Amino acid sequence: MNLLMSAYACEPNKGSEPEVGWRWMIESSKKFNEVVLVTRANNRDSIECEFKKLNINNVKFEYFDLPKWISFWKKGGRGVQLYAYLWECFLFFFLLKKFHKNNFDVVHRVTFVTYRFPSFLWYFGKKFIFGPIAGGERFPRDFLKIFTFKGKIKEVVRMIIQRVSLLDPFVLLTLYKADEIIAVTHDTKTILPKFVQMKARIKPAISISLDDFNVDLSKKRMKKNGDILKLLYIGRLIEWKGLMLSFEALSGIDESKYEFNVIGSGSDEKVFIDYVKRNNLNVNFLGQIDREKLSEYYLSHDLFVFPSLHDSGGMVVLEAKAHGLPVIVSDFGGPKMFVGEKDTIIKSRTAVDFIAKLNDIILIKIEDVDE
């Protein structure tokens, strides 16, 4: 059995989207005799460096990028979506020079993890798997009130694109040609056309390995220092991640009773820093921290807070749980799929109610620490 896999994003130790392509490649190498993975040329160095460490001998990499004169669209993060869309389209012509129709037993398009981009990989295989795909995650419109004006515009545009993308004939053709579709969340499965939903199954986009961390996770968690509740967030600092919900829930709580450490960076960092300063919250913005060093933070905190409004996955939630750190997530998107008995899902249809519930949980946790 041979497999052709396309993964626009495929890099080891990067987390998020790139990690999806890398991990699906590793898993597929265990199931097929031969795997050909095609990805972007600028992934080559990190792939070849890390791949040498793996005991895998049945995977071959092909690299394809659009002409350099198109690449300027991606500078500064602009036009990444359009570039990725065009990459999927022109990939067909790149592959056509190397392979013939139905050359592979199975073809599998892995990333980007969204249904909004087409794929023409189906031409080269007897069976076409499309996914994991996400992008259909939704939240109640009342939560728009926590966004800045710019943030509101972005979210409304996203809501429109969610529906308009399903009018794209190339996307519809991709969904029609797929023999199997892997949807990351229930929201994504249900936003797809009815004829597609019958072919779709729900499966998380990614898992983690305990080998990713250089500590013995079987050991007991570190003892707390002092009598304060230590909260932790790790992720991009962008509005839809729900950080503002956390900050508003902390307003009015004695700042000497808690410490909230925020790890990550993002375009909305200044919005959050300004809010924290205005409201005198005990929040520390620690910036980016290497992944192999995150265990120290997971093991030394009491609660992981991740109230994202439309995450499709939640690698950091899995990492927190692997370290025995209880998590709080919203009822929206994919992170709730990973919670257990010690974790909390906040179910709410309004931002005010959500903030009140989160505030109550934090106060209860503070009382537990005091005891």
Image (tube, grey):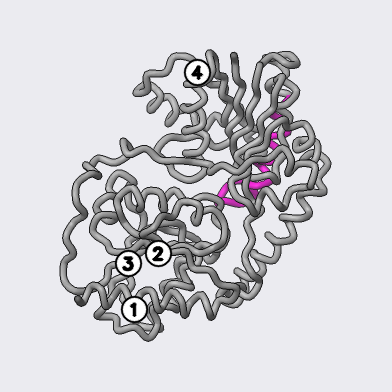
The disc placed on residue 305 is 2
| Residue toward you, 287 or 2 | 2
Q: Residue 255's spot in the image, x, y percent?
A: 29, 81
Tell me: 109 left or right of 96.
Answer: left
Q: Which residues are magenta?
A: 73-92
At mark 4, the secondary structure is strand
Residue in the picture at 75% in, 23% down: 123
Tell me the residue that label 3 is attached to. 231
Residue type indicated by callout 2: Val
Q: Earlier in the sequence, mark 4 or mark 2?
A: 4
| Residue toward you, 267 or 202 | 202
CA–CA distance in space, label 4 to label 2: 38 Å
Tell me the residue that label 1 is attached to. 363
The disc placed on residue 74 is none
Mark closer to the observer (3, 4): 3
Q: Is residue 337 above or below residue 36?
A: below
Label 4–label 2 contact, CB within 8 A: no
Q: Residues within 10 Å of mark 2 (few under 14, many from 20)?
A: many
Tell me: 146 left or right of 164.
Answer: left
Residue type indicated by callout 1: Leu
Tell me: 39 left or right of 157.
Answer: left
